[in-house]
Image (cartoon, rainbow, N blue to C red):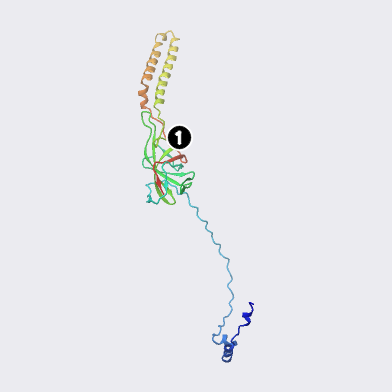
């Protein structure tokens, strides 16, 4: 049934007959074309040894984490459409520079996060750069007061944008930090004990001197003098040790590069 329509076709060949009367189909291709040019074959030039191409390896980007001299330019964020990092979020980071109580106020400090932190709609990846500033510092002072470092964390680099932060340091290594103040050991009471020990050592020395004098018939008359002097000085040191300890200094602070810190957001941050 499908083949019946094919047999019903009739071809009109009258047009072909008219073309054959007026044109020679075998000459049609050659009549309108120009003659081909005569081209002498030339010997191909010998190929020289190809010069080896130098393959340039892709340059691996170096660690761009360097101390910043100035405060970064903060990216403006529309809080109505931004993703919020909640207040109280903590990040474990490592310092990039050595920090000490002699580091000048205003020095910029950089940190690198050690693990990702995930919240709703966002993950802060490992290797994120945090930056801060030395807000206050001083070397050990009298009265047994140790050195001081106050660090303020003010920004984070996220997907090429610098995000404003308000954060503080809560841990250095395994030591908890209160009020964002990293303090050297206060050695006042140690200074008190040191002054008492000085008086006791001097007293023991004078007693040994008195014992030697007592063995001599001539020196037996003056043998009590060293012991009495030692007792007097011991009493002065014991009673005056709280005052004398005021002239002693506290402990120094030196935090080497690579030390682990814990950063905690004081306010919400917006990405």
Nearer-the-camera pick, 122 or 263: 122
Residue at 39% from the left image edge and 17% from the top image edge: 234
Furthest toward the top, the residue is: 217
Residue 90 quadrant: top left
To which quarter of the image does residue 107 belong?
A: top left
From the image, tell me which residue sits under label 1.
175
Where residue 53 sits: x, y (%)? 54, 62
Identify the image quadrant of residue 205: top left
Task: State the quadrant of the N terminus.
Answer: bottom right
130 or 43: nearer the viewer: 130
What residue is at 44 percent from the left and 37 percent from the top? 171
Q: Position of residue 179 (x, y in %)?
A: 39, 36
Most foreground residue, 226 or 146: 146
**From this viewpoint, is residue 28 visible?**
yes
Q: Residue at x 37, y 25 (%)?
A: 245
Picture coordinates of residue 81, whole percent (x, y): 40, 51
SS class of the residue under badge 1? strand
């Amino acid at each position: 049934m499908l083949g019946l329509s094919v047999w019903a076709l009739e071809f009109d060949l009258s047009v072909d007959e008219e073309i054959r009367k007026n044109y020679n189909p075998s000459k049609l291709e050659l009549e309108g074309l120009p003659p081909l040019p005569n081209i002498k074959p030339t010997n191909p030039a010998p190929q020289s040894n190809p010069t080896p191409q130098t393959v340039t390896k892709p340059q691996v980007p170096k660690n761009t984490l360097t101390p910043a001299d100035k405060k970064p330019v903060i990216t403006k964020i529309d809080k109505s459409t931004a993703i919020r990092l909640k207040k109280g979020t903590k990040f474990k980071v490592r310092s990039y520079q050595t920090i000490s109580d002699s580091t000048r106020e205003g020095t910029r400090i950089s940190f690198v996060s050690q693990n990702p932190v995930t919240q709703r709609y966002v993950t802060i990846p490992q290797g994120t750069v945090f930056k801060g500033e030395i807000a206050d510092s001083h070397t050990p002072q009298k009265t047994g007061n140790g050195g001081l470092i106050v660090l303020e964390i003010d920004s984070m680099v996220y997907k090429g944008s610098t995000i404003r932060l308000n954060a503080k340091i809560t841990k250095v290594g395994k030591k908890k930090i209160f009020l964002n103040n990293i303090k050297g050991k206060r050695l006042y009471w140690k200074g008190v004990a040191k002054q008492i020990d000085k008086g006791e050592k001097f007293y023991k020395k004078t007693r040994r001197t008195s014992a030697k004098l007592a063995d001599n018939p001539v020196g037996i008359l003056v043998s009590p003098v060293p012991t009495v002097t030692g007792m007097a000085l011991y009493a002065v040191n014991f009673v005056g040790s709280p005052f004398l300890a005021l002239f002693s200094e506290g402990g120094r602070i030196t935090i080497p590069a690579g030390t682990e810190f814990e950063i905690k957001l004081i306010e919400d941050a917006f990405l």
